[in-house]
Image (spheres, rainbow, N blue to C red):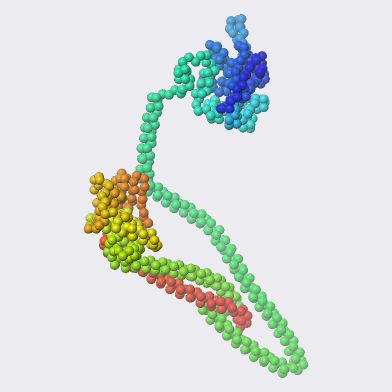
């Protein structure tokens, strides 16, 4: 039992776990429910709301309708049975209309209200889905300014009026407060309705229309009419047909526009390419301008670096000079001491002995001078051969030594680069040598036969016939029995590419099939082999008349061969390609080839293999005359031999440069071994 004001309502519950069920309905200042929060708690069960007339049952139902049904479709107080459809509205519910009082002066009735302007109403309903553990709360805040104003609230969680809708200012101030609690606030019912229908899984608005109708229904009448009127969506077939027609016309126009745009793009493609080139040039110009702006900074930076290097070199040259200055200072002190000694000796009448000692010192210094001059001459010869400056003074000597150290690093880097270059040329020469040997072997094989089959395939067959004591004609290659007609030579490159693999396959008569299959199974062929088991007779499965541009009409099968019938049937059945002159014919055909070598294998698969150039006779396999193939291979062999000679010359040049660099490194090393005092004391 739940008390609602002066009304007693009895609610019966029934357990259910399917879909969203009404968990709780709360109202504040709605109709005659005044000044406090009123609530009912079905807790998801099936409930029955009962009470006396005027006890507020319709008011509660209208509160639920206000939360679920748009105002334009909503009819208040219909559940009470009143014939006055608009007897109540949102304004009367907000102000709390409870009766009418007759004015004696003008004999008119005036509505009596429980609340004045400035009051607000709050409606809240919580729905729960027990099977998914979801809760959705719907709420509306209503107040009156010039007209009825509303806030629509949807929250995927449980809200209550007491906790979340306490008003401390204007009703519109609730917006920020509600958003902080994870609620979504809307100004219009349409957006609010879409959101709660999405959360609660409604497939159509019709369900809420049906709910609105059922609330006020008194009798169902005919079930078919009820379902048709209240449960089915109304459709307009003519409007739908017109919509489809309009859509088709729009799509047609769009398709035409796309085709027009594609043609325009094709026309504009050269202009777009020129525009792209223009943009690239503009970008390069801009980059050049930026570089020019930074050029002064770069030059200043380089000047600073060079100045620092010059200062460092000057300091390095200063160190030996300071050392030499110290030596000269010591010699000067010695000479001063000798001068004192001489003075003492003169005073002691020891002049004779002193002169002898001086003569001996002069002879020793003269011998030392000659040795140093010889060493200096050797140093100058080495420096000249190494491309360095000869000795002129002490500063030049140390500067030359620094240059020699720098050159030693450059020489080492140059030797590494030359070694790498030589190794690359040697590797290329080896590859060319292998290619020449392969071409020579292929030419030798072609000169011994008339077919164009590659030598590697011929060698496999040669080993097979020798092992089985057969003749090569007993198991021919398809390419030896098939060629392009002389009148269709312009199609030869495309046909050769299409039938390249087919032409390298062997034909094995039924008589030799057991021996051949046994040999192939037990032998390492050192290559790939495809062969066909050929019965004595075979008719083509294709009985229809072949088109004039069929591939078969452009081929010639070698006559008087036991395999002629089988090969003819195989070409008709398995290679029913059309040789199309234009791309439009190619696109309409089922299986076709073009002069450019594109192949269509049915409606889906297309192929074009340009790994080898079209018309390269070195890859031809069809026909019984290989003179042109020999000529093409001979020209290729001559080209490779010329290239090999050119690389040999390059290797000799690199070797000469390596020897010169090694000699220069040796001389440079000898120059660096000379000590400073050897030449500085000359």
| Figure check: 675 above or below 593 | below
Q: Quadrant of residue 564?
A: bottom left
Q: Position of residue 299 (x, y in %)?
A: 54, 61
Q: Is residue 74 left or right of residue 164?
A: left
Q: Please name the residue shown 70% across and 85% down the image.
A: 335
Q: Is residue 302 left or right of residue 639?
A: right
Task: Looking at the picture, tell me which residue is in the foreground, 230 or 28.
Answer: 230
Task: Looking at the picture, tell me which residue is in the foreground, 129 or 349.
Answer: 129
Quadrant occupied by the C terminus? bottom right
Q: Please name the residue shown 35% across and 57% down the image.
A: 530
Q: Quadrant of residue 346?
A: bottom right
Q: Position of residue 628 (x, y in %)?
A: 28, 63
Q: Is residue 117 left or right of residue 585?
A: right
Q: Is residue 154 visible?
A: no
| Figure check: 194 above or below 672 | above
Task: Looking at the picture, tell me which residue is in the foreground, 54 or 475.
Answer: 475
| Figure check: 579 above or below 161 | below
Q: Position of residue 395 (x, y in %)?
A: 60, 76
Quadrant occupied by the N terminus? top right
Q: Please name the residue shown 61% across and 9% down the image.
A: 100
| Figure check: 111 above or below 182 | above
Q: Position of residue 574 (x, y in %)?
A: 30, 50
Q: Is residue 348 visible?
A: yes
Q: Quadrant of residue 365?
A: bottom right
Total marks shown come to: 0
Q: Is residue 424 left or right of residue 607?
A: right
Task: Looking at the picture, tell me which residue is in the foreground, 361 or 502.
Answer: 502
Q: Please name the residue shown 53% across and 71% down the image.
A: 412
């Amino acid at each position: 039992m739940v008390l609602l004001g002066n009304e007693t309502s009895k609610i019966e519950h029934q357990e259910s776990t399917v879909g969203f069920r009404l968990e709780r309905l709360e109202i504040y200042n709605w109709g005659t429910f005044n000044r406090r929060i009123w609530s009912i708690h079905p807790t998801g069960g099936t409930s029955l709301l009962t009470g006396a007339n005027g006890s507020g049952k319709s008011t509660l139902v209208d509160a639920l309708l206000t939360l679920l049904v748009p105002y334009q479709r909503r009819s208040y107080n219909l559940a009470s049975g009143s014939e006055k459809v608009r007897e109540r509205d949102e304004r009367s519910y907000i102000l709390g209309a409870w009766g009418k009082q007759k004015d004696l002066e003008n004999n008119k009735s005036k509505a009596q209200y429980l609340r004045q302007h400035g009051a607000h109403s709050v409606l809240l309903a919580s729905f729960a889905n027990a099977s998914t553990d979801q809760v959705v709360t719907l709420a509306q805040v209503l107040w009156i300014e010039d007209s009825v104003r509303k806030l629509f609230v949807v929250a995927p969680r449980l809200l209550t009026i007491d906790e979340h809708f306490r008003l401390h200012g204007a009703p519109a101030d609730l917006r920020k407060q509600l958003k902080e609690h994870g609620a979504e606030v809307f100004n219009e019912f349409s957006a609010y309705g879409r959101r709660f229908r999405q959360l609660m899984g409604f497939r159509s608005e019709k369900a809420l229309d049906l709910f609105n109708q059922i609330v006020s229904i008194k009798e169902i009448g005919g079930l078919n009419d009820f379902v048709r009127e209240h449960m089915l969506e109304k459709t307009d077939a003519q409007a739908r047909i017109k919509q489809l027609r309009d859509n088709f016309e729009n799509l047609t126009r769009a398709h035409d526009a796309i085709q027009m745009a594609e043609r325009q793009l094709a026309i504009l493609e050269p202009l777009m390419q020129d525009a792209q080139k223009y943009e690239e040039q503009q970008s390069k110009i801009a980059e050049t301008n930026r570089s020019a702006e930074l050029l002064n900074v770069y030059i200043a930076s380089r000047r600073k670096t060079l100045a620092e290097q010059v200062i460092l070199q000057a300091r390095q040259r200063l160190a030996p000079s300071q050392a030499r200055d110290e030596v000269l200072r010591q010699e000067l002190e010695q000479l001063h001491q000798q001068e004192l000694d001489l003075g003492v000796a003169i005073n002691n009448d020891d002049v004779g002995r002193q002169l002898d000692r001086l003569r001996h010192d002069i002879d020793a210094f003269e011998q030392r001078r000659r040795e140093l001059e010889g060493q200096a001459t050797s140093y100058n010869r080495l420096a000249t051969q190494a491309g360095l400056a000869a000795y002129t003074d002490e500063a030049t000597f140390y500067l030359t030594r620094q240059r020699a150290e720098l050159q030693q690093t450059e020489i080492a880097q140059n030797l590494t680069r030359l070694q790498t270059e030589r190794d690359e040329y040697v590797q290329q020469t080896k590859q060319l040598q292998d290619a020449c040997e392969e071409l020579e072997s292929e030419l030798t094989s072609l000169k011994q036969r008339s077919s164009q089959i590659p030598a590697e395939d011929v060698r496999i067959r040669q080993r097979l016939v020798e092992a089985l004591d057969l003749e090569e004609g007993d198991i021919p290659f398809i390419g030896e029995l098939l060629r392009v007609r002389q009148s269709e030579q312009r199609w030869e490159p495309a046909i050769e590419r299409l039938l390249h693999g087919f032409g390298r396959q062997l034909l094995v008569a039924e008589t030799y099939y057991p021996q051949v299959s046994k040999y192939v199974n037990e032998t390492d062929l050192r290559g790939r082999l495809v062969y066909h088991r050929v019965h004595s007779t075979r008719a083509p499965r294709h009985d229809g008349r072949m088109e004039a541009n069929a591939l078969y009409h452009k081929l010639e099968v070698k006559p008087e061969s036991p395999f002629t019938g089988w090969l003819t049937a195989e070409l008709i059945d398995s290679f029913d390609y059309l040789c199309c002159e234009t791309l439009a014919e190619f696109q309409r055909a089922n299986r076709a080839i073009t002069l450019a070598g594109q192949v269509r294998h049915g409606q889906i698969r297309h192929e074009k293999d340009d790994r080898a150039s079209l018309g390269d006779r070195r890859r031809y396999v069809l026909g019984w005359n290989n003179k042109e193939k020999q000529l093409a291979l001979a020209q290729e062999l001559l080209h490779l031999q010329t290239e090999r000679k050119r690389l040999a010359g390059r290797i000799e040049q690199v070797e000469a440069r390596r020897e010169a660099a090694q000699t220069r490194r040796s001389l440079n090393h000898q120059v660096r071994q000379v000590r400073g005092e050897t030449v500085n004391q000359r």
